[in-house]
Image: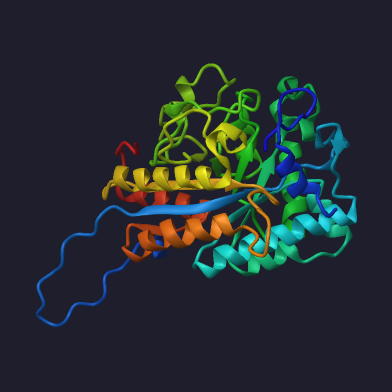
Amino acid sequence: MERSRGARRHRLTRRQLFALGGGVAAAALVGCSPLASPGAAPGPPPGPLLRFTIGLHIEPFGTTAQGFRSGAIGGRQLDYADRTFFDRQVEDIRAVAAVVERHGGRMTVQGQSPFTPAVLERGHGVLRELAAAGHEIALHFHEDAHLGPRWQAEPVERWAAVFEEELALLRRAAGIARVRSWSGGNTYPRLYEAAARAGLQVNSDWKDPARQATPLALTGVHPWRPAGGTDGTEFGAFARHDPAGPVVFLPEGAYDREDFAAMRRATEFGGDAAYFAYLGERLRAAVALGRADRVNVHHITIHPGEFRGSGAAPFGVIERFLAETVDPLVASGEVAWATFTEMADAYLAWEGAHPGAAPK
C-alpha cells in the first residue's frame, strides 16, 4: 500500500480499506552443527542458508511532523489522530507480531510520522514492546509526505535533516538508541548520500512509487552496496556493486515478476490465499538460488490491517504460510529468521572475510 506521485491516492480494495479503517547478531543466526562425538568423522559442509523475515510498513496517515497532509484513500482521510483508527492499527500490529513470535520469528517494523508522534503523545508502548521482544524498529519514509510535492528538487541537506527528524521521533517512540535501516525515497538520485549523512546504513524495498513495480535487476537473494541511487529510469549505478558504497541494499528475494509488490491487490490473482501461495513458491525459489559461499536473503512485506481476513482467526493466512512453508524450512536448516540489520551484519561479516569478492 504505497503512494503514487502527487496526491497520495492508495489503490486499495474495499476489503483492505475495511481492514485499515473498519471498526474505526546476524552471525548467530547461522546454524551451528551439534558438537560431534569424540573421534566422529566430520559431517558434510553446511549448505546454503537463507535469511528471511517479514517487513511491516506503517503508512503516514494524517499530518506528518513536517506539516504535510497524507493518507487519503478513496476520498477518505485516514488519520492516526483518530484514536479509534490508531487503536485498531495497534491491535493489528500486535496481532501479527504475536503470530510471528509463535513461529520463532522477528519482524522489521518500519514506522514514520504521523504514527510516531501519536505514540509519543499518548504515551503508548507498542513500539517499545516490539523492540523489547526482539523485532527491529526501522524507518519507512514516504518522500512526498515528509518533503512535500517538490521533494525531487530538495537538496541533499534537506533530505538528511528530515531523515534525522523522523529518526529522532522513531528512537523516542521505541526507546532505542539507534535506527540503521529504512525503506523509501526510492527515486531520489542522491538518496544514499542523504541517508548516510543521517546515519542510515541498510536499505530495502525498492519499487517505483508510480508504477508499483520493481525491475528484476534489483531482485535476487544476494545483498550488495549500490554505486549510486536512481531517478527511477536509469539503474546502472544502483545495480552495480561499489565496495566503498555507504549503504548495504537488501534485495527482496527471488521474485520473478516486476509487479510482485502490487499483485496482492489485483483480484485476478485470487485473493490472499493465492497471493501467499505465490509467496511460498518464491521463498522456495530463493532457497534454491542460495549459495553456501554468499549471504542469501529474502523477505515479504505487509501493512497493518492487511491480510486480516474475517472470522475467529485474524491473519490466519499469515499463520498458515508460516506453519506450512516457513517452519519446515527453518526446521531443515535451510532458512533462518533474521531482521534487516541482522541480514546486513551477516553481509558485513562476509565482506570482511572475503575482501574483493563479488557479492552477487
Q: x, y (%) of residue 240?
A: 41, 27
User: Which of these two is toward me, 74 or 234?
Assistant: 74
State the image coordinates of residue 199 (x, y, percent, origin top left). 62, 45
Q: Say which residue appears at 37% left-offset and 44% top-offset.
A: 286
- Judge from the rendering whether residue 120 lies leftward or rightward of residue 11; answer left or right: right
On the image, which quarter does residue 17 sit in? Answer: top right
Tell me if 45 is positioned left or right of 288 in this view.
left
| Residue farthest toward the bottom in the current orientation of the protein | 38
- Residue 174 visible somewhere in the drawing: no
79 on left or right of 103:
right
Spot the residue most to the top.
233
Classify 199 as above or below 261. Answer: below
Residue 191 in the image, given as x and y percentages of width and height:
62, 30
User: Which colour scheme appears in the figure?
Assistant: rainbow
Q: In the picture, residue 224 is in which quadrant?
A: top left
Indicate whether 32 appears above or below 121: below
- Residue 171 visible? The answer is yes
